Image: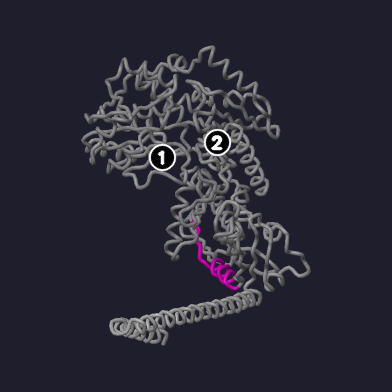
Amino acid sequence: MKNKVVLMFLGNTVLLTGLSIALMTIAPIWGILAMLCSAAVTVVFYRFRQEQELSFEHHLEQALKNANETADSSTKQLMMSLALPCLITDDQGVIQWFNVAFGQLFPGKRLIGEPVVGVIPQCEELKDKAAFVCDVQLDGKTYSLIAQKLEGTWNACGLTLLDVSRERELEHLYEAGRIAAGSITVDNYAEVMSGLPEGDQNKLRMEMEAALYRWASPLEGMFRRIDRDRYLLIVDQQHLNILLEEKFRILNEVKKIKGYNDIPVTLSIGVGSHQSTLAEAVSASQAALELALGRGGDQAVVKREDQFSFFGGNSRELEKRTRVRARVIAQALYSLIENAPDVIVMGHKNPDADCIGAALGVCAIAKHLNTPARIVLGECNSSVKKLIGSLKKDLPPIWIEPAHAKNFVQENTLLVVVDIHRPALVECPELMNRSAHVVLIDHHRRSADFISRPALMYQEPYASSTSEMVSEILQYAGNGLKLSKAEAEALLCGIVLDTKNFTVKTNVRTFDAASYLRRQGADPIKVQNMFRTDLETYRKIAEAVEAANIHKKKYAITYCLPGKDDMQIMPMTADELLTIEGLRASFVLCPHEDHVHVSARSRGEINVQRIMEQMGGGGHQTSAGAKLDGITLEQAKKMVIQTIDEYENNEERLR
């Protein structure tokens, strides 16, 4: 309509203008008058249009304002009456507004002007996050807290609470009803039964089963014996949680039963939970049981999806009197080496004498079978350099640096890993993916992360050292395998180091291995000279011992300053501390660049492996260590003390 009026006005203006020009040619006066009339009409119309547009804009603005006020009022009314509890804070985290539903959760409480963290402590996370979601408990219900900082309002935030009590209850019922499987074995069955009369064997077997059935009957699951020393347990997650809370007390209860020569009965338990099917749960329980046995037995391992939890493991590893497995492993290893084009032997980073000795023993087998062999060797401490320096005179050049090792490994190369089973700690992790055939020989208790699917695995935590295990393998070589004097002394060095001169984890088979090496030409005097220290090293050890702090009257915690031989001084200091009356465990820390190394030792009453595992490390019950990244020395000390206290609390709950 407005466009039509404008067009009409323009048409009339053009007409009047044309008429005025025509009149001016005929009668100038009339033409001028016509021109003035046309201008007057144009001015009047322009003013009319201007007032009309101003009036329209005013009415439009007023209409929008009224609409906004109505919408704002409706929004406020809607937010106030919304069933979902909501609130808004300022940039200091102080509550500025909340709706009726939120106020009903805190009747009679003054909320405006109060810090939101005083009302909902979980909101502390908003200091570092733009948004987050978490569950909170309010008024006996579970709410999902949805918090988000508001745009354009500095750091002000809005919070919304969503009642999820029913959903969480259903989730809890679902989790409680999930099926878990447990594989249980008497891991020293042969040892406790051998030597007993048949009648006593039956009595002992009945006593063990009675204890197990008493333990399993309240769990309301299925418990069955599937072999003479193996059992299967099927329970739901709700009852499995009971076992987790009591930390598998059956491990201690069954040790009250004594077998031959008063040897206590010990169990190993593997549990698989949070799996998709029962078959997967049983498979996971068997994998967890293998891990428990690989860690020395007398413990429970729970595999929850891809995570492992450990309970027990306080008994010392029991010596296996039979060498059948060593003979079988020897035959399999000889076959693999004989059919391989070449052999690469690799130990752990910063190798010790046990690692070097075991590697040389494997190379001796390869030499006997005419298979080329090399050893990957990186940085090492002065004692190992001294050992290698004496060996180089009598051995061919078989050492290769980690940076060049990948050039020697082909797909069919046999890679033998000794004295370590954790992929991240080997001398050159790249090699693990370059060879299709990996052999693992180790005496450490198995950790959750270990080399998966090796072609051959020989892991015995009862053995004193990897050098002892390799020495046993060498004895089954036959065909006149003869060690050189240097190779025999290197293996004996490994045994002497890990047994601390035949005082720790030493059994009959340890002495048998040492006797074999002595017959091969190893000189005990020369071996002892390998471990002699200079005066400066001894002073550093004395300084670290003097600086030791005693925690709970039985734990010694100290540090040594970084130096060229810090990796050697740490374990020597830890061993020296254990000679002090009353101390049961020692922990020596050493800062290095952006991390701190920890060396732990014990007399056997304290399982330092479990303490170090909580800090990302591992090892044996009496000898373990860890490497703490991105941490200061003081922080490391606090972490060690905190982990010791947690270990003590767990042990107290088991008693």
Dot 2 falls on a residue whose secondary structure is loop
Q: Is residue 304 left or right of residue 344?
A: right
Q: Quick check: is 180 in the magenta stretch? A: yes
Q: Which residues are magenta?
A: 166-183
Label 2 vs 1, first from the N-terminus: 1
Residue sticking out furthest to the right: 108
Q: Quadrant of residue 407?
A: top left
Q: CA distance from mark 2 to mark 1?
A: 20 Å
What is the x, y in percent for residue 133? Answer: 56, 61
Residue 76 x/y as whole percent: 63, 74
Residue drawn at the location 61% of the way across and 67% of the way down: 160
Where residue 450 sits in the image (x, y, percent)? 42, 44
Q: Amino acid at mark 2?
A: Ile
Disc ID at residue 305: none
Q: Is residue 546 above or below residue 9?
A: above
Q: Which residue is mark 1?
A: 424
- In the picture shown, does residue 128 fall above or below 423? below
Q: Quadrant of the N terminus?
A: bottom left
Left or right of residue 413: residue 223: right
Point out residue 358 in the picture as x, y percentages from the top left corner: 38, 29
In the rendered structure, which amino acid carries the disc numbered 1? Ala
Q: Secondary structure at mark 1?
A: helix
Closer to the camera in the image, 71 or 560 = 71
Query: In the rendered image, which residue does mark 2 sit on?
Result: 631
